[in-house]
Image: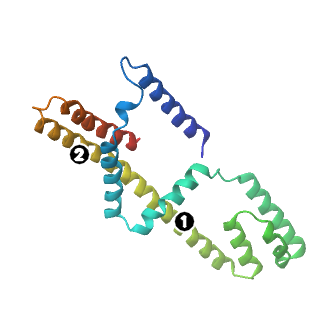
């Protein structure tokens, strides 16, 4: 993950926390700890995602998120150096000599390509196989991206639903003055969670 992304997220969280703590008359994060609103927004977003996508793809989001957050970018210098070394060795000793280097290759995609070369596969066959694999990888990434984009769209909608529900409940119990602030908190907290989830 790019360090600028991490820094942007941390700085925004820090500024939000500072703004909440500096607010006059606010007792920390207590006003934002509204479990009803959180369950409505998060649960609604998850259920809407299940309605629109197969369970297998939704369950696989954890793996995609882990890759996005933890996996570093590919070292192109290493790949180019490996290619040059393998090409020089194949020119000197032949393609079969590359078998000994397969275990040391870290990149799985490159390793599969070299394995096909060692097996004596045709150039066009190798190209077609690797291009097909790239297509499948892109398709998997595209589906994961679509699901996250969809969740970012659903969350604000459920925030609005929570806001409307809170307002209806508040107006329904307007004669009970003590219940009004709690219902208003539900209304505004739902909008807060929905918009925060979208970012």
Estimate the spatial distance between the alpha carbons at disc 1 and disc 2, rounded to whole Å. Answer: 36 Å
The residue drawn where x is 80% and y is 61% is 84
Indicate the quadrant where residue 187 lies.
top left
- Measured from the top left, where is residue 99 in percent x and y? 82, 76
Q: Is residue 135 above or below residue 47?
A: below
Image disc number at residue 161: 2
Residue 9, numbered label: none
Q: Around disc 2, counting alpha carbons within 10 Å, would you say few (fewer than 14), some (14 to 19), or many (20 or more)?
A: many
Secondary structure of residue under mark 1:
helix
Q: Who's the residue at 70% across and 72% down the image?
A: 113
Snapshot quadrant of residue 67? bottom right
- Residue, disc 1: 137
Label 2: element kind: helix
Q: Nearer the viewer, mark 1 or mark 2?
A: 2
Q: Residue at x 75, y 52 (%)?
A: 77
Contact? badges 1 and 2 (CB < 8 Å):
no
Q: Please state which of residues 83 and 180 is positioned toward the viewer in this rendering.
A: 180
Q: Which mark sits nearer the N-terminus, 1 or 2?
A: 1
Question: Is 160 left or right of 8, judged from the image as shown?
Answer: left
Q: Residues within 10 Å of mark 1 (few under 14, many from 20)?
A: few
The image position of residue 183, as x and y in percent, is 22, 36
| Quadrant of the frame with the C terminus | top left
Q: Nearer the viewer, residue 66 or 135?
A: 66
Instruction: Give me the residue at 46% from left, 63% from top.
Output: 59
Instruction: List x then y, in percent, for residue 48.
Output: 31, 58
């Amino acid at each position: 993950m790019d360090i600028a992304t991490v820094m942007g997220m941390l700085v925004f969280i820090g500024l939000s926390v500072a703004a909440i703590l500096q607010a006059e008359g606010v007792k920390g994060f207590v006003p934002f700890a509204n479990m009803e609103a959180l369950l409505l927004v998060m649960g609604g977003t998850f259920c809407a995602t299940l309605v629109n996508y197969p369970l297998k793809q939704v369950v696989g989001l954890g793996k995609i998120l882990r890759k996005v957050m933890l996996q570093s970018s590919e070292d192109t210098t290493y790949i180019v150096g490996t290619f040059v070394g393998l090409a020089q060795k194949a020119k000197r000793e032949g393609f079969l000599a590359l078998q000994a280097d397969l275990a040391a290759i870290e990149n799985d995609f490159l390793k599969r390509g070299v394995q096909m070369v060692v097996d004596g596969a045709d150039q066009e066959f190798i190209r077609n196989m690797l291009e097909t694999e790239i297509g499948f990888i892109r398709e998997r990434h595209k589906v994961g991206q679509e699901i996250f984009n969809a969740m970012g769209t659903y969350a604000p909608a459920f925030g609005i639903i929570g806001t409307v529900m809170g307002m209806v409940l508040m107006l329904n119990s307007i004669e009970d003055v003590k219940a009004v602030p709690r219902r208003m908190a539900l209304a505004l907290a739902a909008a807060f969670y929905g918009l925060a989830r979208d970012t």
